[in-house]
Amino acid sequence: MSQLLAQAQQMQQQLMAAQQEMAEAEVTGQAGGGLVIATVKGTGEVVGLKIDPKVVDPDDVETLQDLVIGAIEDASNKAQQIAAEKLGPLAGGLGGGLPGLPGF
C-alpha cells in the first residue's frame, strides 16, 4: 500500500511539473504563409500577434480577420497537441481528464 501511495505522490509531482511547464510554454501559429503570426501560451492565452503590413487593406478587412483567426487557431491547436503529449500519459494515470487545460 505504501508503494502505491509513493507512486501516486510521484505522479502528482510529475503532473504539477508538466502543468507548470505548459503554463510557461509559448507556441506560435501562422496563417497566410506567415503574414499573420499568433503567439499562444500553453494554457491557451493569446500573448502576441504580428501582422505583416502587406495584408492590411481597408477595403478587405474580412481577409485580415480570417488570417488572424487562422493564426490563433493554428497556435491553439499546437498548444493542445503539446499539452496532450506532456500531460496525456499523466492524465491517463489519474483516471480522467484535467479540467481547465486545453484538449482535456
Image (cartoon, helix red, strand yellow):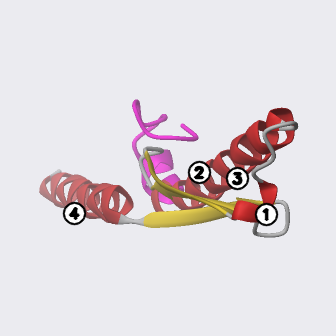
| CB-based contact (under 8 Å), mark 3 and mark 2 | no
Identify which residue, 33 or 42, lies in the foreground. 33
Q: Please state which of the two labelled residues, at mark 3 or mark 4, is closer to the viewer.
A: 3
Residue type beneath disc 2: Gln
| CB-based contact (under 8 Å), mark 1 and mark 2 | no
The residue to which callout 3 is attached is 71
Main SS of the magenta segment? loop
Q: Secondary structure at mark 4?
A: helix
CA distance for labels 1 and 3: 16 Å
CA distance for labels 3 and 2: 14 Å
CA distance for labels 4 and 2: 24 Å
The residue to which callout 1 is attached is 54
Answer few, some or many: residues within 10 Å of disc 4's Cα (few below 14, many 20 plus, some between 14 and 19): few
Q: Considering only order in the chain, which callout, 4 or 1, is on the residue closer to the N terminus?
A: 4
The image shows residue 62, relative to residue 20, as above or below, that is above
Residue 99's x, y, as percent? 40, 30
Answer few, some or many: residues within 10 Å of disc 3's Cα (few below 14, many 20 plus, some between 14 and 19): many
Q: Please state which of the two labelled residues, at mark 1 or mark 3, is closer to the viewer.
A: 1
Q: Secondary structure at mark 3?
A: helix
Magenta extent: 88-104
The residue to which callout 4 is attached is 10
Q: Secondary structure at mark 1?
A: helix
Q: Considering only order in the chain, which callout, 4 or 3, is on the residue closer to the N terminus?
A: 4
Identify which residue, 92 or 87, lies in the foreground. 87
Residue type beneath disc 1: Lys
Residue type beneath disc 4: Gln
Residue found at x 41% / y 47%: 43
| CB-based contact (under 8 Å), mark 3 and mark 4 | no
Answer few, some or many: residues within 10 Å of disc 1's Cα (few below 14, many 20 plus, some between 14 and 19): few
Q: Secondary structure at mark 2?
A: helix
Residue 25's x, y, as percent? 40, 65
Q: Considering only order in the chain, which callout, 2 or 3, is on the residue closer to the N terminus?
A: 3
